[in-house]
Image (cartoon, helix red, strand yellow):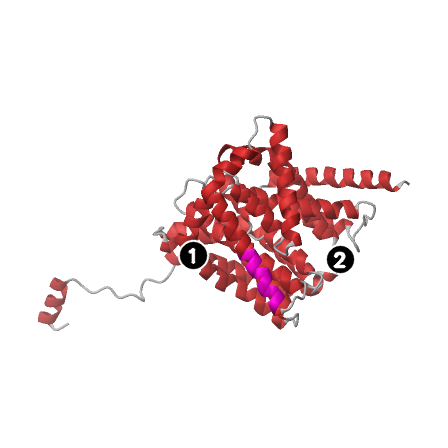
């Protein structure tokens, strides 16, 4: 069979399968990410029916998927909103980093993977899934709840941290010297700072230059600009994903809304391809040896995310029930964890299977945690024995006891 014919058949089968899996996940009420990963495992190296002809095209589609994920995320926020969230949610972001990144780093060191892999696995366990969490909030009708801005604030801090974390990780994975790493970090900081400055001061001018009443022109200009900036960012060792995120921040108003509407279907398609490609790159036989560490890590970091949400909601003055809901909502991991693991597999092959198992667990448990953390926590706290706390008797009763000598 001709290579082009085989590639078309494989791509058609992949996309059709993704559509059916997405419909199944929608009916069950879960995120389709676990099913996409499982599909990739089934059709990758060592799977049931390995795919070969479309592998190169799928790899390119996966890169585009990551870029679109970050672009659409950037379009959700304006530069001023990000600056405001950074000021108000910084303590919660610091707690989030310490509680959730440290377990991943410690696990990598205990597994003997070295410091670079420790930095990568720290990112895998640190970052919650914005996509899954946004879907959970919408499906559960919690978008108007008091704790929802707190959840979004933590996610924004994590997204901003990615703009600095990814270039550092990329430099470490490339094996650059201390001087090279410092230069990469300075370039990253300078790029992020410049984009924020331009977005704050001249965001309207940029949006006006990109704006078009013709949806076709708007789609081509925004998509082309994003790919161009992502490629330049990659060449500067800043990370293509960060470049796409910064383009999203720079656009605002009607342009951002229009671009988001037009690009969302493309994002969903290529993001699904990305998750499948990650599964294709992982040998299913490599997962059982790391299943126990992945499960332990999932349990530990689910609890630390709940603690993070509790702390952040408490700082915002949210009531007890809202604190539990905040923590449970933040449990899910997904796209960012896979992106980070995908970057690091060249340095430590074991991180791919571990991240796959870890994400499969938490992307499945995440929606359940968002729904059941609050009622379970309140049920357990209400069942605490009351006889441990002795309530003083009224003053009149104490006087009567003194008189009678009892």
Residue 208: % across, % down:
52, 33
Q: Is residue 184 above or below residue 259?
A: below
**Residue sitting at x 62%, y 42%:** 226
Please tell me whether mark 2 sits on a helix, a strand or a loop.
loop
Residue, far left: 403
Q: Number of marks in the image?
A: 2
- Between the C-alphas of marks 2 and 1, the distance is 39 Å
Say left or right for 28 vs 384: right
Residue beneath label 2, please?
A: 283
Dot placed on the residue nearer the N-terminal end, 2 or 1: 1
**Residue sitting at x 62%, y 33%:** 219
Residue 380: % across, % down:
42, 57
Q: Which class describes the residues within 10 Å of circle 2: few (<14), some (14-19), or many (20+)?
A: some
> From the viewer's perspective, is the residue at label 2 or at label 1 nearer?
1
Say left or right for 130 vs 22: left
Residue beneath label 1, please?
A: 90
**Residue sitting at x 77%, y 52%:** 44
Q: Nearer the viewer, residue 334 or 293?
A: 334
Q: Nearer the viewer, residue 14 or 65?
A: 65
Main SS type for the magenta part?
helix
Residue 355: % across, % down:
64, 58
Residue, far right: 1
Stretch of the chain drawn in magenta: 179-189
Q: Is residue 194 above or below residue 206?
A: below
């Amino acid at each position: 069979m001709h290579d082009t014919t085989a590639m078309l058949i494989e791509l058609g089968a992949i996309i059709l399968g993704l559509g059916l899996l997405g419909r199944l996940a929608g009916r069950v009420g879960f995120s389709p990410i676990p099913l996409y990963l499982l599909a990739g495992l089934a059709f990758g190296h060592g799977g049931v029916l390995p795919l070969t002809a479309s592998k190169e095209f799928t790899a390119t589609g996966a890169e585009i998927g990551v870029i679109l994920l970050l672009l659409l995320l950037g379009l959700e926020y304006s530069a001023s909103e990000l600056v405001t969230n950074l000021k108000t949610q910084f303590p919660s972001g610091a707690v989030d980093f310490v509680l959730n990144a440290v377990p991943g780093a410690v696990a990598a060191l205990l597994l003997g993977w070295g410091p670079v892999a420790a930095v990568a696995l720290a990112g895998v366990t640190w970052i919650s899934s914005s996509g899954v969490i946004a879907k959970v909030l919408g499906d559960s009708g919690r978008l108007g709840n008091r704790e929802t801005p707190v959840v979004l604030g933590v996610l924004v801090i994590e997204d901003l941290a990615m703009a600095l974390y990814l270039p550092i990780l990329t430099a470490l994975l490339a094996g650059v010297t201390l001087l090279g790493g410092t230069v990469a970090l300075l370039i990253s900081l300078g790029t992020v700072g410049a984009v924020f400055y331009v977005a704050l001061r001249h965001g309207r001018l940029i949006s006006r230059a990109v704006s078009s009443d013709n949806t076709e022109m708007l789609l081509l200009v925004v998509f082309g600009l994003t790919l161009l900036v992502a490629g330049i960012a990659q060449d500067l060792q800043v990370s293509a994903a960060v470049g796409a995120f910064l383009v999203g921040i720079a656009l605002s108003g009607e342009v951002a809304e229009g671009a988001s509407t037009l690009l969302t279907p493309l994002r969903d398609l290529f993001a699904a391809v990305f998750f499948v490609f990650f599964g294709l790159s992982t040998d299913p036989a490599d997962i059982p040896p790391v299943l126990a560490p992945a499960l332990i890590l999932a349990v530990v970091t689910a609890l630390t995310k709940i603690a993070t949400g509790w702390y952040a909601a408490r700082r915002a003055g949210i009531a007890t029930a809202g604190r539990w809901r905040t923590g449970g909502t933040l449990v899910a991991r997904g796209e960012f964890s896979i992106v980070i693991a995908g970057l690091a597999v060249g340095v430590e092959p074991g991180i791919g299977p571990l991240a796959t198992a870890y994400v499969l667990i938490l992307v499945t448990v995440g929606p359940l945690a968002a729904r059941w953390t609050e009622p379970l926590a309140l049920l357990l706290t209400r069942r605490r024995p009351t006889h441990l706390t002795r309530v003083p008797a009224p003053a009149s009763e104490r006087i009567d006891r003194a008189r009678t000598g009892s």
